[in-house]
Image (cartoon, helix red, strand yellow):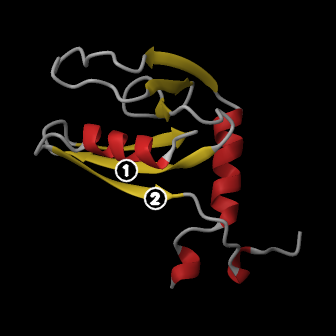
Amino acid sequence: MAEYENNAYFWQKLDTFYFSGEYEVKHKKGDHHSEYPNLVYPVEVGCLEETNGEHEGVNVYRGSGSMYSITGLVIAVDILGKTLDVKMLVGCSEEEVEEILRFLNQTDYQKTVLIRKGATIPGWSISDN
C-alpha cells in the first residue's frame, strides 16, 4: 500500500504546476493576520495566480531555503468556513515546517495534515510511452 501514498511522479507534476504559475506575495514573514491579529505569519505567504485555490489561487508558504524546492503539502480543513484547502510548502526547513503547522493549527476550527515530498516511483505508475 505504501507505494500509492507518495510517489515521485506526483511530485514531478506538482513541480511543473508550481513552476508554470505566477507567484504573488500576500504576506511577509512577521505580518499579522488581517482578521486575527494575534496570528503572525511564520514565513512569507503568497499564492499562485490563475490557479484554483480557496480564494484567489493556491497558497504557497515560502521558507528561507531554495524557492525552487517544494518541501511538501499541507491539507487544511476548516469547519467554520466549510473548506478543504491545499497549501504548498516551498524551501522550508524542518523548523519552518513546524512553525507553519503550529500557525495553521492554532484554532479548534481548522486542523491540518502534512504530506512530505517523496521520491519513490511505484511500478504501477510507469507507462510504456
- Front-lying residue, 49 or 59: 59
Q: Residue at x 68, y 51 (%)?
A: 13
Residue most extreme to the bottom:
1
Name the image quarter holding residue 24: top right
Amino acid on which disc 2 is placed: Ile
Q: Crowdedness of circle 1 by 10 Å Cα count: few (<14), some, many (20+)?
A: some
Residue most extreme to the right:
129
Which SS class for mark 1?
strand
Residue 20 at what x, y percent from top left?
Answer: 71, 32
Classify residue 80 as left or right of residue 49: left
Q: Is residue 40 above or below residue 119?
A: above
Q: Quadrant of the C terminus?
A: bottom right
Q: Which mark is residue 75?
A: 1
Residue 11 at what x, y percent from top left?
Answer: 64, 55
Q: Residue at x 57, y 25 (%)?
A: 50
Q: Residue at x 50, y 26 (%)?
A: 47
Classify residue 27 as left or right of residue 102: right
Name the image quarter holding residue 15: top right
Amino acid on which disc 1 is placed: Ile
Q: Which mark is residue 115?
A: 2
Q: Is residue 23 above or below residue 94?
A: above
Q: CA distance from mark 1 to mark 2?
A: 8 Å
Verify CB contact (< 8 Å) between mark 1 and mark 2: yes
Classify residue 26 as left or right of residue 30: right
Q: Residue at x 47, y 28 (%)?
A: 57
